Image (cartoon, rainbow, N blue to C red):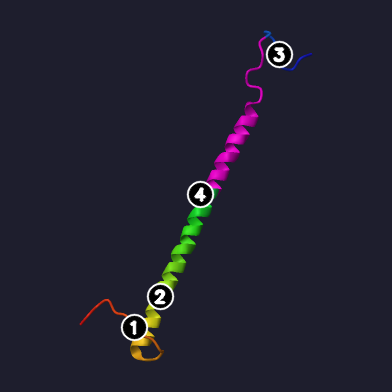
Amino acid sequence: MNRNKQPGGAQDSERGSGTVLAAGLGLVVLAAMVLLLMLAQAAVMASRAAAAADLAALAAADALRGVSAGEALSLIHI
């Protein structure tokens, strides 16, 4: 008895379609994970940039007040 034959004698044309469907679904899940990883990395970099800007502003304020050594650069000229 052959499992690939249907009662009318025609070949089963859907053989292996589950493998293709599973591979396609796996690629979609992998693409979604890569996208989420890239978004998370962008959020981390934005947070680091904001922290660096805050620290630079605090260092400039300390230098302007004379608390620490250095020269504060100001973009606003009075």
Q: Which residues are magenta?
A: 10-33
Tell me whether circle 3 and circle 4 mark residues in contact (CB < 8 Å): no
Q: CA distance from mark 3 to mark 2?
A: 72 Å
Q: Residue at x 33, y 87 (%)?
A: 64
Residue behind mark 1? 72
* Residue pointed to by mark 2: 54
Q: CA distance from mark 3 to mark 4?
A: 43 Å
Per the image, label 4 sits on a secondary structure element best described as helix
> Is 12 included in the stretch rendered in magenta?
yes
Alpha carbons under labels 2 and 1: distance apart? 14 Å
Residue labelled with disc 3: 5
Where does the image place residue 69, in percent across and percent down from the top left?
40, 89
Per the model, the C-alpha gap separating discs 4 and 1 is 41 Å
Residue reaching furthest to the top: 8
Element under disc 2:
helix
- Which residue bears the numbered disc 4? 35
Q: Residue furthest left?
A: 78
Image coordinates of residue 34 in percent, x first then y, are 54, 49
Q: In the image shown, does 23 or 67 lie closer to the viewer?
A: 67
